[in-house]
Amino acid sequence: MNKNIVSLFLTLFTCLSVFSQIIEPVKWSSDIKELGDNTYELIFKAEIEDGWYLYTQNVPEGGPIATLFSFENENDAFKLVGDVVESKSKSKFDKIFEMDLSYFMDSATFTQKIEVLDPSLALIKASVDFQSCDDEKCIFEFSEFEILLPNSAASKGENITQDSKDKKGTPSKAASSTDGDARGLWTIFLLAFISGFAALLTPCVFPMIPLTVSFFTKQSKTRATGIRNAIMYGLFIIVIYVLLGTVVTTIFGADSLNALSTNVWFNILFFLLLVIFAISFMGAFEITLPQSWANKVDSKADKGGIAGIFFMALALAIVSFSCTGPIVGGLLVEAASKGGIAPIIGMLGFSLAIALPFTLFAIFPGWLNSLPKSGGWLNTVKVVLGFLELAFAFKFLSQADLVMQAHLLEREVFIAIWIAVFGGLALYLLGKIKLPHDGPLPHISVGRLMLGLVTLSFVFYLIPGLWGAPLKLISAFPPPLEYSESPYGVGFTKLGTSGTASESELPEGAHLMAPHDILSFHHYDDGLRYAKEVGKPVMIDFTGWACVNCRKMEQNVWPDPSILRILKNDVVLISLYVDDKRELPEEDKYTSLETGKKIKTIGNLWSDLQIKRYKANAQPFYVLMDHNEKNLIEPVGYTPDAEEYEAWLTEGISKFKK
């Protein structure tokens, strides 16, 4: 009898311990505030457990999953006013994702203004998709909110604050103010400042410096007047370009620009624009504003006074557009992808670099003697900028391809294109290629030769990237290593511990996981079927594309020689990504009996499997099972100790062999 009681107690304890693996580190609640004139403020609050953190809404491409809100509004009963605004967050550099990431700890508040258009509207339905992590695991979740409007019949006498229910939603990008954003704006400013100096060295701008300076020094009655006019000229240049950045921000909205960075069609449009700009710089044609504009502005510049100086600055912007336009356009494209006031900051940096030389040479006209003479080198600068814009354009095409998961521009193809572009640039600098506006080149200057050799060295640096080299110098540009034809480059992959194999030699549904070449399946049934064929136990890896601690295990623990040997030879690995956003076929969608959630995506399916079978919802989560789908050993989560992880693998495999 006592033994039965003890056995029952142990069973209950085991069950409780298993069920305790379902964790909810972020608890959501909602509220509503009436602002008047049929306008309301929706308030979403997240309470975060100690040791956990929630990512913000603005996460760079290739990073973890951002917090994303959506609102059900099929009949246009209300409209969103602006975007979701979040409370202040923290920021730090993440070594796994190799980028600055912003996050919340303890709590976070998100607000969204709405204007009600339908007087009969009583309920606002919203949802949030989010990722939270601690130092050992991550949770990928979604929650639903149902918020009653204060003046609706249904809400009278009821408490408006609603606890959240679980549901996945459609993302809506938003604005935030963080330290990471500030650093991003400084980057945009410096990039724009450097681009402004590059624009100075083009055939449309550089010859204007001595002409403009001579005008101020000769036409001004006193030196003080000349200096004053030159400073005003520089300030007006800055005002004109900053106004351009302001117009772009105003048209698109400061908080909406960031959404363009993940929009497929805008990325394709940006790509096409930069290609056109690049071809223009190479001499195929010139992008110019109507000549009538320049004539009208020029006539007003002759009137003198402050207005005349302003129109002189405007004339410079119009006349030099064929050279500065592609650079300004490229900057605005890049700044728009950052969102917020980045276009304004970008134009400030660009115009400051343009204005400074005009102002300084007017104050110190003696410096003009030190300027190099105009010549063919100005066109060389323009062509070099064209090559750079062409290379940069493929960054936007790559982003569109990544969002669509079309696999048309995988890592090897991207690197091959860059090798071709920079190889062409090297040949041009070394005098082996001539373009339409190039003059005779009797010899190559030392500066041009050195730049050509540097470019050629960069091409040689890129070539190993075709065979899996990480290329850390350009890590922000090409697709990630896993988004490639194979982890070791074109036509070369490894299977097992040695030898090579083509993709056609892999089992059905299998692929080689970069960078260790571990045979892995992304579908449960495919992996289980193969395990039965080869007589090996199954290891299920519940993971996520944006799971930090999953990457830590794969980068720090799995490469251990003993563990890597086991993963390659002794088990069949099935990696199930719970954040896979691909939609399931309509006939395969269902509502989970365990959670009540609607299972719409592949990631939802694997997450539901983990909860239903193992009563756990955190990643990473590792399971060793036999061919009857029975556990060989108790599943484990994040295990940074390689010896402990190896012991777990060895014990489970030994039980399978018995």
Image: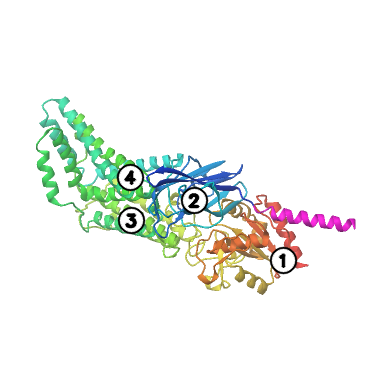
- The residue to which callout 3 is attached is 270
**C-alpha separation, residue under disc 2 versus residue under disc 1:** 47 Å
Q: Amino acid at mark 2?
A: Leu
The vertical placement of 507 against 514, above or below, is below
Image coords of residue 234 (percent x, y): 22, 35
Residue 630: give its label.
Answer: 1
Q: Earlier in the sequence, mark 1 or mark 4?
A: 4
Q: Nearer the viewer, mark 3 or mark 1?
A: 1
Q: Main secondary structure of the magenta part?
A: helix
Q: Amino acid at mark 4?
A: Pro
Display coloring: rainbow
Query: Any magenta on residue 19?
Result: yes
Q: Amino acid at mark 1?
A: Lys
Residue 343: give its label.
Answer: 4
The vertical placement of 617 against 655, above or below, is above
Does residue 253 appear left or right of residue 647 in this picture? left
- The residue under the point 31% across, 50% down is 330
Q: Nearer the viewer, residue 526 or 41?
A: 41
Image coords of residue 36 (percent x, y): 39, 43
Tell me the SS state at disc 1: loop
Q: Determine contact: label 2, label 3, CB under 8 Å.
A: no
Does residue 430 appear left or right of residue 519 in this picture? left
Image coords of residue 434 (percent x, y): 24, 57
**C-alpha separation, residue under disc 2 versus residue under disc 3:** 42 Å
Tell me the SS state at disc 4: helix
Q: Nearer the viewer, mark 2 or mark 1?
A: 2
- Most extreme residue toward the right is 1
- The residue to which callout 2 is attached is 148
